[in-house]
Amino acid sequence: MSLTARLDRLALSRPHYKLLLIGGLGYSFDGMDGAVVAFLLPRIQELWGLSTASLGLVGSAAPFGFFFGAILAGWLGDRFGRKKVMLWALAFYCLMSVVAAMAPNFEIFLIARIFAGLGAGAESVIIAPFLSEFIPPKRRGWFIGTLAGFFSFGFVAAALIGRFVVPLGEDGWRWAQVLTAIPILLLLWWRRSLPESPRYLISRGRVAEATEVVDRFEQSVIKATGKPLEPLPAAEEEIVKHEQKINIWNALKFMWSKAMRRRTAVIWLIWFVITFSYYGFFSWIPTLLVGRGITITKSFEFSILIYLAQIPGYFSAAWLCDRIDRKNTIALYLAGSAISAFWLSQSNDSGMILVAAATLSFFLNGTYAGVYAYTPELFPTWMRATGVGLASAVGRIGSILAPSIIGIFAASLGFGGVFTMTTVVLTIGVLGVVIFGASTAGKSLEDINARTEHDPAAAGSK
């Protein structure tokens, strides 16, 4: 009996939700770390007398580290296992966040932020592929979209820290970073109990270990539901041991082969567009609001409301992923983001700015729910983590460029010009996914990648 079929027949229950919580909390801490820097910018600018361009470097520091972390984690996750990368990357991020909090000068702070981004990027990239390999096809879109929704809790927590902790004296910004790091120690302890992905184990020829994991997982589901499992017909395993050497170069050649180049181009475009727009918006929103005549304290209060809008954005998109497909969900929310960005570019009244910015937050983060569900599905098991890591790394190019570009051009373009630029970028993303995106809803990971799961060389011949 196929081990993957045994996993796919299981009803969602407590063991799945435990995986969701353990993985999701990692995303919450990643989101909190990425968001809290926006609230530190006005403080460290005053402390170290930084220029606007230097502030842009701070905004780009973590995404720069995220870029290399995403590439490295994808390769390591496919070679050495998902679980190990999730543990070590999170521990490294925690350490670097504490170093940033203790930084005596701008240079040390910037370097620590880069390395914290490397850890966060590595940790973030591996979670979605790991969980997607446990979830039945009919609920996978909702489940991984909901997983991405944990980012929103981190952003809301960051906004609260920015409002109530950062203003607490000269060292408030330092304590803010400590608060984003210390709780991770508890999550690390909890993650020790995670199983390795059976799909990964099968792809590495470790079938006995995979069988043991599936046996234990089935028993935990039976215990949670109180129901016996449905019988399955005998079938061959849909994943076989991958003999080709796993490295980034082989993965890139495969991703741009005839069978894969369309998928790769679309998902890379989506990642670049959404991450450029997302980081351009959230890295600068408090500073841009201040430039619009809103006080620092008021801008932080606005930011809390803007971040709260993320929560329904993520979870509404997660709900749609299994109903109208990932592709259509992404297109819908990208279009909503483009309209909201244009609305924001034309807003002058503070109340209108708040509503438009909250709407943009809703749609941008809803797009991410679809993207996180969609990306792992497009690649076969043997290089799934590498594929997700490379796609995410392309997105991080956008996140590196966006804060610096906005920092350089904000003075000349102004508030409206910044969001007009964002509108154009988002519109390009809408066109790309509508024209070239592929449908994945309701299909097993092996069905989606049937042409290449067994023989990667076939990808270049069809």
Image (cartoon, rainbow, N blue to C red):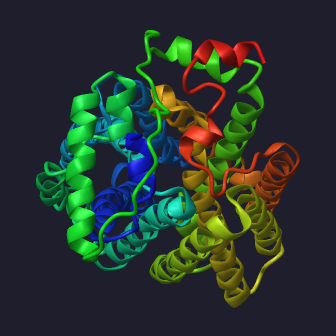
Is 381 placed left or right of 77 in the picture?
right
Q: Residue at the spot x=50%, y=17% of the render?
A: 248
Q: Position of residue 260 (x, y in %)?
A: 71, 27
- Residue drawn at (16%, 58%) of the image: 182
Residue 286 makes an appearance in the image:
yes
Res 110 seen here: no
| 396 relative to 296, above or below | above
Task: Check the image and report above or below for 228 versus 373.
Answer: below
* Extreme residue in the bottom direction: 351
Instruction: Name the residue located 44 percent from the left edge and 58 percent from the top edge.
Output: 9
Location of residue 338 by image quarter? bottom right
As drawn, is 320 to the left or to the right of 151? right
Picture coordinates of residue 390 (x, y %)? 55, 30
- The N terminus: image quadrant: top left
On the image, which quarter does residue 227 sit in? bottom left
Q: How many marks?
A: 0
In the picture, the quarter occupied by the C terminus is top right
Question: 258 or 210: nearer the eye?
Answer: 210
Q: In the image, residue 279 lies at what x, y percent?
A: 58, 53
Q: Is residue 329 left or right of residue 155?
A: right
Q: Position of residue 153 (x, y in %)?
A: 40, 72
Q: Nearer the viewer, residue 57 or 401?
A: 401
